Amino acid sequence: MGAIQGSTYDRERVSRVTKEHTYGTWRKQGPWNPLVVERAEGVYFYDKDGKAYLDFSSQLMCSNLGHSNSNVIEAMHRQAEKLAYIQPSYTIDARAELAEELSSVLPGNLDRFFFGTSGTEANEAAVKIIRMYNSSSGKVKIISMYNSYHGSTAASISLTGDFRRIQAEPDFGINGVVHAPPPYCYRCPFGLKYPDCGLACADYIEYMIKNEGNVGGLIMEPVTGTNGVVIPPPGYMERVREITEENDVIMVTDEVMSGWGRTGEWFAVDHWNIKPDILTTAKGITSAYFPLSLTATDRRISEYFEDHYFAHGHTYEAHPVGMAAATAAIREYKRLNLIERAREMGKYLSGRLEELRERHPSVGDVRSIGLFAAVEIVRNRETREPFNTYRDKVEGRPLMTDRIASEMMKKGVYVNTWVSHFVIAPPLIITKEEIDAGVSAMDDALRLADSEVK
Ligand code: PMP
């Protein structure tokens, strides 16, 4: 019995057995040297030696409420004690409560909910829904964006617009996904400048719809997450919504990362008052206390499935503990006014990060919306030449962002990195002093990049 209790394992054993027998995510397995973590509280997590780390990215931009929230933990505990599992054709109080809580915060007419266990599954379901809904018209093609991430299984990796899809091709994935240029103004795919560009990237979507034929869906992250907190310029989202409506294309907004107060609104689409036909989300829905995802469909789609067979489902669909965790989490966002707080604290974070741009020649761009920010580093500010490309990552060459993040870890600050940028997305409960501590660690560590600037 003793052997299965974590406390009898020393750090070296946990690390060695983990590394030998379990896979580390998105990496070559050889050089992996996992940090052994013991516990977490508030905006901190602690390794097995008791060292504290400020969680400047809410782990994978998911622990929005912070760690050890006792109301969420108690709700999960109560539900597990009463009923830990029941098959999803039956229902329970917590599922009805969650449906009502969701209706109170989701935009538009999103009134029917499919519950999976990951963002990947939520998007996988969205693709299937688009194709089932359009089965008689044959509008099976889906437009997605380059520089996006939507998940790691067949449909969702095909939607993905970064190198993770390239790695999976050509044998793994689905047909009929075409990619559009993203509204990434710092690296405009057309080499244009806003507003003179006239939103060429949005118009290009219409061009694609006309020329591809049979486009039935469009999926996008309204604020791109892992790939750099790319915030569309004013007018872009409105134009895309117009194009999808005019062409009868189902618009899916993937709010797996951008939802749940992260951007200073419940959902990123709320910034532009966009009402998508389908919204997918996960992560913050339970603040990562339980694996749960949501595919929410608007009334038109919900009604279609009234008399069409919905050939989709999972054993862990609408898991009781997940239902309880999400209901409690949403009530915590409300009780603690975390959406407003993210907006307020986001202004403070943004100001502090702008100082980094002024001080460090290696900082090419700073983007932020609410408590969701990216600091993108470059070797040359004028040419915007990056320190690394995705090839360096895949082939295992050391990345400048990883070197900086390791330096920050030594100082007790964790930040998420992705090739050329840092994703700063702390728990929404963070204080100004804690933001200062995170920014100060980055301020020091950026010297590593400054010294190699051309
Ligand atoms: N969509 C977006 C926008 C994401 O950020 C992620 C995860 N980072 C996913 C989908 C996939 O979610 P999951 O990892 O829960 O499968």
Image (tube, rainbow, N blue to C red):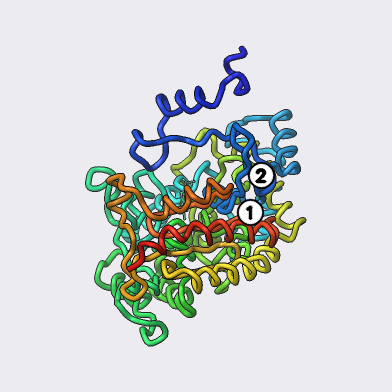
Q: Is residue 137 visible?
A: no
The residue furthest left is 170
Name the mark on residue 362. none
* Amino acid identity at mark 2: His
Residue 224, image quadrant? bottom left
* Amino acid identity at mark 1: Pro
Q: Relative to 9, say whether 335 is above or below.
A: below
Q: Position of residue 166 (x, y in %)?
A: 27, 51
Q: Position of residue 448 (x, y in %)?
A: 43, 58
**Element at label 2:** loop
User: Between marks 2 and 1, how big is the CA–CA gap?
Assistant: 8 Å
The residue lying toward the viewer, choosing from 195 and 220, is 195
Crowd class of label 2 (few under 14; some 14 to 19; many from 20; radius 10 Å): many
The residue lying toward the viewer, choosing from 174 and 379, is 379
Q: Position of residue 295 (x, y in %)?
A: 52, 52
Residue named by callout 1: 427
Counting residues from the start of the chain, the first of labels 2 and 1 encountered is: 2
**Element at label 1:** loop
Which residue is at 39% across, 70% downward? Answer: 184
Residue named by callout 2: 67
Q: Is residue 366 visible?
A: yes
Which residue is at 72% across, 41% downward? Answer: 93
Q: Position of residue 31 (x, y in %)?
A: 36, 36
Q: Relative to 108, say whether 49 is above or below.
A: above
71 with respect to 440 (left or right): right
340 with respect to 420 (left or right): right
